[in-house]
Amino acid sequence: MTSRVSQALVESLAAHREDGPVLSLYMPTALEVDERRQNEIRLKNLLRQARSRLETLGMAGTGAQALTERVDKAPLEREMWQAHGRGFAVFAGRDLLAHAALPFRVRELVVASPRFQLRPLIEALARQRRFWLLAMSQKDVRLYRGDEKALTEVDTGSHLPRSLVEVAGREPTGKELYFHSANRGGEAAIFHGTGAGKDDVEPEQEQFVRAVASGLEHFLKQDDSPVILAADNQLRALYARVSRHADRVLDEIDGNVEHVPEESLHAEAWRRMEAELERRRDTELYRLGNSGPELPVSADLADIVRAATEGRIDTLFTAADRHCWGRWDASERTVEIHDQPLPGDDDLLDFAAVESWLKGGAVHAVPGERIPGNGMVIAGLRY
């Protein structure tokens, strides 16, 4: 069974140990029906590379063949190529076989080492950040929980009013906006309209928005997820004025979304959420790269590996497209780095990432060209 990436899955893979190397395979997946055969071909090509890699590291040909054949002969569900997103990962050892679906494309990767390669899975967890989506118009109020995969409408019971009529006892008037989706070429949804300005706000409208904002507080207490607000200009301005949690609004979608398909609304909301997550990563990376002496920062891999094992990493950026082979000697607390992988070597970038993540650090895998200094790794330390 193919698993969605979860904290429990990553923890179990991180804890797994065997005598000898284990395999980590990553590949992008084609989703169209007429292209799906490419996925099976790509997997077989990766397995050929994996067998060669295992033999180079000293595993006997029969052992390497047995390990790769275990993956090749596994009853992988063929429908998974369509159902499980843009990337796929396989983790194989003599005592374990697991698959993970990824919601984003990954580069082809074959790693044979003492530990599973897990940076892409940790990155997938970081992308699972959830959010609230409040879709508000005078005629309809809906609350959703959202993540990268989908929106799920929340049963708000009596906490949120469903319309202005329910609050004020009269039909809504004023600005009307309309929506249409421009899907060709991947363009974003378009909202447009005409109508009243801020001077046309009526007491009933403010009463309505106050009721929505007050009712929303019940749900915002559940967690610290940000809010994306979908409403017209007038209602958004009112919400900003009357809500005690206006600072939780991450971004806004302009327009009346009463009749917007849920898929289009999700696509627009996630586009904004993803952009904000990227902005936050960039801000933190810039802060680390331009830090003064008051902020403990290191770009030395040996120092970062030690700090990771000691739980001293607050934020870690590693190059997603690079590896650094070597060994961590826990008893001597020393790091040995090699130009090429040797039998028993681990990818120290991945080792540092997993150790940091297991001990509560924030971990990001980005292109190496974005990492200042050596283009490999940089970390903000707790102390």
Image (tube, grey):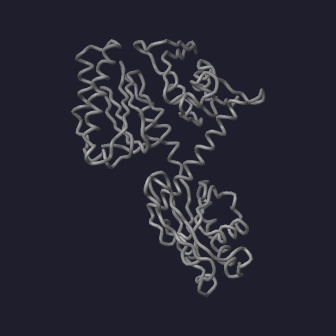
Q: Residue 159, can we see it?
A: no
Which residue is most to the front? 185
Furthest toward the bottom, the residue is 170
Count of labels in the image: 0
Q: Is residue 164 toward the left or the right of residue 207 in the image? A: left
Question: Can you say whether 380 is above or below 21 in the image?
Answer: below
Q: Where is residue 96 in the image (x, y as percent from the top left)?
A: 32, 31
Quadrant containing the C terminus in the rendered view: top right
Residue 298: % across, % down? 66, 24
* Above or below, 36 relative to 299: below
Q: Is residue 266 above or below residue 380?
A: below
In the displayed structure, does residue 295 sit left or right of residue 266? right
Q: Is residue 45 at all visible to an observer of this figure?
A: yes
Location of residue 286 with respect to 253 vertically, above or below: above
- Residue at image x 57%, y 28%? 369
Which is nearer the eye, 156 or 76? 76
- Apparent side of residue 17 relative to residue 369 in the rendered image (left or right): left
Quarter of the image containing the N terminus? top left
Rendering quarter of residue 58: top left
Query: Which residue is painted at 58% across and 22% down in the image?
Result: 305
In-front residue for pair 369/305: 369
Q: Which residue is painted at 53% across and 28% down in the image?
A: 319
Could you tell me residue 27's position as x and y percent?
36, 34
Residue 55, x across and y down, in percent: 30, 15
